[in-house]
Image (tube, rainbow, N blue to C red):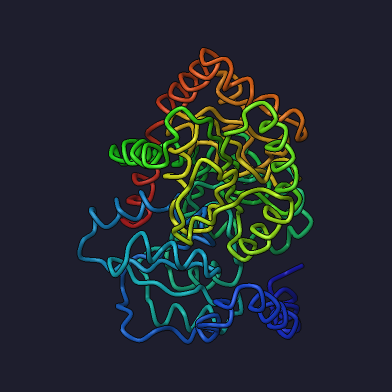
Amino acid sequence: MNSTIYSLLFHLALPLILLRLAWRARRAPAYAHRVAERFARLPHGLRPGGLWVHAVSVGESIAAAPLIRALRERHPDLPITVTCMTPTGSERIRALFGDQVQHCYLPYDLPWAARRFLDRLQPRLAVVMETELWPNHIHACARRGVPVVLANARLSERSARGYARFRGLTAPMLAELSLVAVQTEAEAERFRALGARPERVEVTGSIKFDLAIDPALPERAAEQRRAWGAQQRPVWIAASTHAGEDEQVLAAHRRLLERWPRALLILVPRHPERFASVLQLCRGQGFATVPRSGGAPVTADTQVLLGDTMGELLFLYALADVAFVGGSLMPNGGHNLLEPAALDVPVLSGPHLFNFLDIAAQLRAAGALVEVGEEAELAAQVARLWQEPEVAADMRAGGRRVMQANRGALQRLLAGIERALAG
């Protein structure tokens, strides 16, 4: 497939895209707002001539935060525009930066929308987080001489096979990138094989290892547990769960309650549109459940705290003795394993971690990650970590070693961005 056919198919698919947007708006009404931005009708008052950073959704926005802060420090005279594709990503960007950055949705990848977007922003450099690649946007930047940096890039074998099926489209797009800053050498080889220019591919590591934890956060979490009267109460968290995982997590919690009747589960679904249905699931299965957003206190009778707020995941991790990271019992590829590790919390996951193979391998080798297959094994591993504090201590120490050994990716990425900006 070449770019002309791709653009034609994208135009033909617009009715389906809009129908999908309307369907998603039924579950998450924010999808019905700011639709004009998706067609490059951007907000008034955007200053042109700055830096543009694209982070598709919540996870990429959080990962991009240290980079954006560093760019603001290095280039205080340049406006920074941060784009995303989802309402939750938009909320996260606003929560992280307020009016310190400009923000809008990235328009759909249509040639005329990409041109209109660049006409308005006139960026000096574009930074795309991870692997959110849009051919028409990248081609429009290349035609105008705007350097494009693919930052913190990751590419699994499965994704590489998918891109290879459309080599006529992906190879020219990758060749137009000014810098591909990848997390591992294996991913570097995949990008080169798909058409990225070898001299423009650099292994910088994952900037997720450079996660900075507010020193006050653990103490705030300890104060919260004291307020709940839960200093000695066993607490675990299941975070970023997907449909099909919540049921397994709740089944594991039911097993744990048989031995620890006062055990508390903090359950945090990945997508906000599922908050209401997961609350209904918890209560429908007979668990005494309190939604975090409601402000009701966690009491000795509370069995499940539903994490249905935005921007609190690190705080919720800090409340727990053990963390299970979701998206991994189902074949979704997993989510960020480093957040609980950075907070000194032992990490459990399911077996499906193809989005984080290198990170998972390092944590596993350091004894900082245990993978489980189903609810009985999940319950058994949580129980083990509650029963054997020395095992939990070894896992925490392993996580600290991995975090420390990999720091510095942000500085390497920034150096590459400065070279691209300098031309």
Q: Residue at x 49, y 46 (%)?
A: 152
Image quadrant where residue 18 sits: bottom right
**Picture layout, residue 324 above or below residue 113:** above
* Image position, residue 341 (x, y; %): 48, 31
Residue in front for this viewpoint, 218 or 118: 218
Which quarter shows the C terminus? Answer: bottom left
Residue at the image point whose x is 37% and y is 37% from the top: 226
Residue 336 against residue 18 in the figure, above or below: above
Q: How many marks?
A: 0
Q: Seen in the image, is 159 located left or right of residue 233?
A: right
Give 65 or 276, whichever is nearer the viewer: 276
**Which residue, as the protein is rendered here, is positioned at the far front?**
301
Q: What residue sits 35% from the left and 49% below the top? A: 66
Task: State the residue in front, 338 or 155.
Answer: 338
Q: Is residue 112 left or right of residue 329?
A: left
- Identified at 68% across, 49% down, the residue is 194
Q: In this rendering, does residue 275 appear at all?
A: yes
Task: Residue at the far top: name it.
Answer: 390
- Residue 122 screen position, x and y as percent: 37, 76
Q: Residue 299 location in percent, x, y?
A: 49, 45
